[in-house]
Image (tube, rainbow, N blue to C red):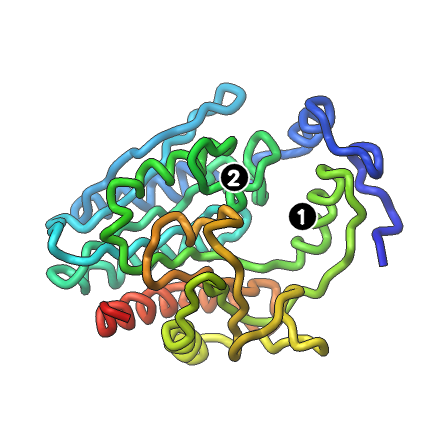
Amino acid sequence: MTQSTPYPIGTPGTPWGPAEVEAWRATQQKQRSYTDEVVKAIDPLRASFDVEEYGSVDYAGEHYPFFALRTRHWDDALPVMVVTGGVHGYETSGVHGALQFLREHANDYTGRANVLVVPCVSPWAYERIHRWNFDAIDPNRNFRDGSPAAESAALVRLLAPLADNVLMHIDLHETTDTDESEFRPALAARDGKDYEPGEVPDGFYLVDDADKPQPAFQKAVIEAVAKVTHIAPADANGEIIGSPEVAHGVIEYALKSLGLCAGITPARYCTTTEVYPDSPRATPKECNDAQVAAVRAAIDYALAHPAG
């Protein structure tokens, strides 16, 4: 089944050029404030963490700095735990779950691990509640050297000096109803392809690394999150968003080769969370709490099993 109504931008079957990107960009309106909701939430944390501006972008006269927060007493002898949120700006609980973890739990690991948190990788998209950046590029397919996405390139540069010391990287995401109503149709139109409708899973799930899976690690995270919110079931084909379910609430992608955020470093333990905020069984608070539970379980498991 393909989309019966063409996406309103572009010509079906023809990839977008600069004119179509500009037409798409003109439809993107600011709906919330990165400064008010993220930067101001970071400011009180400066008393407890080292805050670094690791890059920035300027889009149409608007300036967006990128911020990372680090353990204050960084110890190179300790493993590094990386938490990222807001790779896709519309995935709200990834951003606010990361901030909540910083406020409530990050300092619990002082003396046991170095914690590095990037709460909002894509601030322009955060303000517009969108998946792509200003150039209609998905940052989460472009975490590699020479990336065309400035947001991705900056994070790759930030993590490069730490790569060999990163034990765990958890990337906080959401799967929403707008994935099917807007973002996947837009992707098909941008790339000149047919849109094939999919099914949005109702609940939380994880994406493990197909090239170096860690099933016990994923299981520990799922069990922790299940105490907070419901876990997504597989569909009638035994799949979640088109990928085989390999364990309860777990699918696998080749993270590094696909240019996904959780694959930036060679971390032994890596995963991508997916919360479903549009579920009638979940609240915004529950979604944030689920992200925090996932982060804590991921760090706890990695500390308990540093050698795999």
Image position, residue 212 (x, y; %): 42, 64
Q: Is residue 19 above or below residue 237?
A: above
State the residue position of label 2. Answer: 127
Given residues 30 and 87, the one toward you in this image is: 87
For residue 226, what is the image quadrant? bottom left
Image position, residue 288 (x, y; %): 43, 62
Q: Quadrant of the N terminus?
A: bottom right
Given residues 244 and 130, the one toward you in this image is: 244
Horizontal relation, residue 111 to residue 26: left or right: left
Image position, residue 25 (x, y; %): 65, 29
Give the label on residue 122, or none.
none
User: Which residue corresponds to the image point at 22% horizontal and 47% vertical from the top-left?
Assistant: 70
Q: Is residue 305 above or below residue 104?
A: below
Q: Residue furthest top?
A: 61
- Assign a secondary structure to mark 2: helix
Q: Quadrant of the C terminus?
A: bottom left
Q: Is residue 250 above or below residue 19?
A: below
* Residue type (three-letter) at the residue carrying disc 2: Glu
Q: Nearer the viewer, mark 2 or mark 1?
A: 1
Q: Residue furthest right?
A: 4
Give the label on residue 183, or none.
1
The local crowd at label 2, few if under 14, some if 14 to 19, many if 20 or more residues have their Cα within 10 Å, is: some
User: Which residue corresponds to the image point at 45% horizontal and 36% vertical from the top-left?
Assistant: 151
Label 2 with label 1: CB-CB less than 8 Å: no
Horizontal relation, residue 52 to residue 221: left or right: left
The local crowd at label 1, few if under 14, some if 14 to 19, many if 20 or more residues have their Cα within 10 Å, is: some
Question: How far, Cα to Cα, is label 2 from label 1?
Answer: 16 Å
Given residues 36 and 274, the one toward you in this image is: 274
Horizontal relation, residue 268 to residue 25: left or right: left
* Residue type (three-letter) at the residue carrying disc 1: Phe
Horizontal relation, residue 226 to residue 55: left or right: right
Image position, residue 76 (x, y; %): 13, 50
